[in-house]
Image: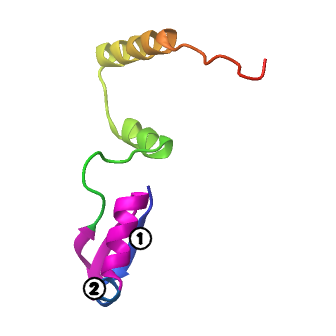
Amino acid sequence: MKVTVISIAEASRNFVDCAHRASRDGATFLVTEAGTPIAKIGPVGATFCDGAMLAAAIRSVRLSAEEEKAFADDLKQGHSALIAPEDAWG
């Protein structure tokens, strides 16, 4: 999910709104002072990961040939275990 950069003054003026958006929408705010990050306001609990974030994380990992094969095998096994939903319109 996108991180919104806000100044400490803006965070102070809008703290309740930021906290509610973090809780309700999973929003994350990076609080800065004079352009320097000093704090983060975000949801507590499970972290959010969309497809783009997952792809970036995977690209940043360097695997050995053995690890690459094991990962590919895991993906194939997981894919084969998927069950298509019933067509409610069919």
Q: Label 2 belongs to which residue? A: 8
Magenta residues, as a range? 14-40
Query: Is residue 15 depicted above or below 58 in this figure?
Result: below
- Is 38 contained in the magenta span? yes
Disc 1 crowd, CA 10 A, few/some/many (<14, 14-19, 20+): few
**In the foreground, 39 or 89:** 89
Disc 2 crowd, CA 10 A, few/some/many (<14, 14-19, 20+): some
Query: Which residue is rendered at x = 31% and y = 32% of the image?
Result: 62
Instruction: Specify whether 50 is left or right of 46.
Output: right
Query: Is residue 48 depicted above or below 40 in this figure?
Result: above
Q: Residue furthest left?
A: 38
At which x and y percent is residue 72?
42, 16
- Is 3 contained in the magenta span? no
Q: Where does the N terminus fall, quadrant-wise?
A: bottom left
Query: Is residue 37 depicted above or below 80 in this figure?
Result: below
Identify the secondary structure beneath mark 1: strand
Amino acid carrying label 1: it is: Thr
Indicate the quadrant where residue 9 lies: bottom left
Q: Label 1 belongs to which residue? A: 4
Q: Which mark is drawn over residue 37? A: none
Query: Which residue is rendered at x = 30% and y = 63% of the image?
Result: 42
Query: Is residue 83 depicted above or below 33 in this figure?
Result: above
At which x and y percent is residue 69?
37, 13
**In the foreground, 13 or 56:** 13
Indicate the quadrant where residue 84 lies: top right
At which x and y percent is residue 10?
35, 87
Query: Which residue is rendered at x = 51% and y = 14% of the image?
Result: 82
